[in-house]
Amino acid sequence: WKLNGGVVGLNSSTYTLAAPADGDDVLCEVTSTAACSNGIIAGSNTVSMQVGATLTPAVSISASATTFCSGTSVTFTATPVNGGNNPAYVWKVNGNTAGNNSATFVSTTLANNDAVTVEMTSDLDCATGGAVAATPVTVTVTTSVTPTVTVAVSPATEVCANTNVVFNATTANGGSTPVYQWKLNGNSVGSNDPVYSNNTLADGDVVTVEVTSNAGCATQPVVTSSPSNITVHPLPAAPTIAQSGNTLTSSAVSGNQWLQNSSPISGATQQTYTVVTSGWYAVEATNTDGCSSKSDSMFVTVTGIEEVALAEAVQILPSPFYQNFSIKIANTVIGINDWTMTITDNLGRLVVKNDNLGYINIIDLGGHAAGVYYVNISTGNARHTFKVVKQE
């Protein structure tokens, strides 16, 4: 055997080249011992060695994201070193095979703290070892949330006109500072507040609220509540009161509730009511929808037998008046007792007081507002209240 022309092995049919170098030439010469061979030496063909450098494969991973929301599609890409023309890949998640033989791995199902790696096997002839693994990429996954909003309505979605209706929004997964936009019939109203109120709603109005969540990983940042459909019933006409002596009559035929000093009178629900004690009286009328309107209040002094005569003995003119009016007491009774007078306005406030009325008394209310005034005349055990009206 000859290596690069030099003898390296003798009388063996095999030769082992322990450390070939690039360009080494190996051949074999054979001397025949056959009869009649005359010791001829025959040379073999020359084998020229091509020796490449030993290569160490490696692989690394890049990810489209390492922190993301659950359900996000994330792509991992393998970058080989000394992988050859067609390296083989095995992707793994937490040590378990998860991907096919590809330089990329795509997943939408990763969980928090999952570790992704890839094993690569080079197809180079001079690659050392077998499969090599990349440094694992550990991902941070935040759970995705779905914002929701509900609206509570107080007192109800079916109300009477002029009722103040309060809408209160409750959000889930709205984040630390959700943004609220209330809408009335599709038009923006209210302010950035979870509460919206309105006392001028009309029948058929629709109220909703849009909430923009700032929660991380919100699947749908803007959500809208279910509509609150409002039914508004009209108020009945405000009733008026007619007085005849101690009897009051409401202009409303039904649905009456009489009030004394703004408090309901138990059982006083008829069209008429007979006053038994002096005070301020009004009537509230309720229609079939449960909506109510209240009359103006009037002060009523309980009338006795003596007061009927007193009412006939006192004359007040003119009414209505513009600046002043007169109180005239009949000559036949002026001297029997002392006559006193108080005048109160429609709110019961004292306007004028006179403890010594005469035959004719001029009352000047020029400096007071227009409206209804009550003239309360007393003498002995008798008393009577007259209503006068001041005009502008």
Image (spheres, grey):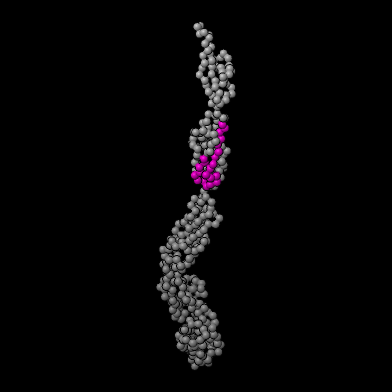
Q: Position of residue 188 (x, y in %)?
A: 46, 62
Q: Is residue 52 above or below residue 172?
A: above
Quadrant for residue 288, please give it. bottom left
Residue 69 is a magenta residue: yes
Whether residue 42 is visible, yes or no, is yes
Question: What is the span of residues highlighted in magenta in the rendered image?
Answer: 55-77
Q: Position of residue 99 (x, y in %)?
A: 50, 37
Quadrant for residue 227, please give it. bottom left
Residue for point 47% across, 55% down: 223
Residue furthest out toward the bottom: 331
Whether residue 309 is visible, yes or no, is no
Frontmost residue, 104 versus 138: 104
Residue furthest out toward the top: 35
Residue for point 55% across, 57% down: 177
Q: Is residue 55 above or below residue 147?
A: above
Residue 171 is a magenta residue: no
Frontmost residue, 77 versus 271: 77
Residue for point 48% across, 65% down: 198
Q: Position of residue 238 (x, y in %)?
A: 44, 73
Q: Is residue 20 above or below residue 175?
A: above
Frontmost residue, 319 versus 305: 319
The quarter of the picture where the N terminus appears is top right
Frontmost residue, 177 versus 16: 16
